[in-house]
Image (cartoon, rainbow, N blue to C red):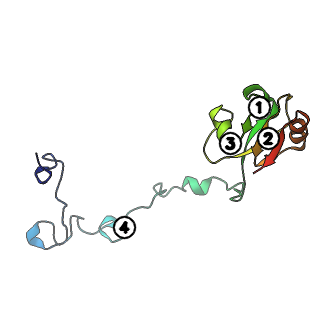
Amino acid sequence: MRLQDLRPPFGAKKNVKRVGRGTGSGHGKTACRGSKGQLARSGGGKGPGFEGGQTPIYRRLPKRGFNNKFKVEYAVVNVGDLERVFESGDEVAGEELKEKGLIRGYDVRVKVLGDGEITKALTVRAHKFSDGAVSKIKAAGGSAEVI
């Protein structure tokens, strides 16, 4: 077998129907659209959301709310979780938190909150810290670094 001998299996490729190329082709004149009517016209047919003349659902339902495209969401981790999962002297950052299963997803921002107690000296790197979390981490002999 050589590269030039490779062919798609029979029936896998079908010739494109060339319409509007003269009467001899069998697909000329009306170009397989029939004669007259909405679907015979260019741009004819009903658009998406058309419900047979009934008021479409996107017009029947009220418009509510607001989506802030600048909103920044954080994955939340508590100091009690850090105490439970990490050993004393460990460096804690996004990758370590993901490996231990404390956060999900890629490229997420992390905020450390002060719920729980911590006794281990950890070096914690995160995007945000609550005041309570910083004081508890420092009281345990660790450090809190903002990325």
Front disc: 4 or 1: 1
Q: Mark 3 vs mark 2: which is more N-terminal?
A: 3
**Residue in front for this viewpoint, 83 or 8:** 83
Element assignment for label 1: helix
- What distance separates the C-alpha of mark 3 from that of mark 4? 54 Å
- Mark 3, residues whose alpha carbon is within 10 Å: few (<14), some, or many (≥20)? many
Q: Which residue is mark 1?
A: 82
Q: Helix, strand or loop at disc 2?
A: strand
Judged by depth in the image, the label closer to the viewer, 3 or 4, is 3
Mark 1 → mark 3, Cα distance in angstroms: 12 Å
Q: Would residue 24 appear left or right of 134 to someone viewing this image?
A: left
What residue do we see at 75% from left, 45% from top?
126
Left or right, residue 105 beside residue 134? left
| Rendering quarter of residue 19 | bottom left
Judging by the rendered image, the residue that carries numbered circle 4 is 44
**For marks 3 and 4 on the same chain, the one whose residue lies earlier in the sequence:** 4
Mark 4 or 2 closer to N-term?
4
Q: Which residue is mark 3?
A: 94
What whole-number distance in Å separates the C-alpha atoms at marks 4 and 1?
62 Å
Tag 3 near tag 4, CB within 8 Å: no
Mark 4 vs 1: CB contact within 8 A:
no
Picture quadrant where residue 111 is located: top right
Q: Please provide percent x and percent y for residue 101.
A: 65, 32
Instruction: Identify the element where label 3 is drawn.
Output: helix
Q: Which residue is mark 2?
A: 112
Mark 3 vs mark 2: give the one in front.
3
Return the disc, 4 or 1, that comes first in the chain's sequence. 4
Contact flag, marks 1 and 2 (Cβ < 8 Å): yes
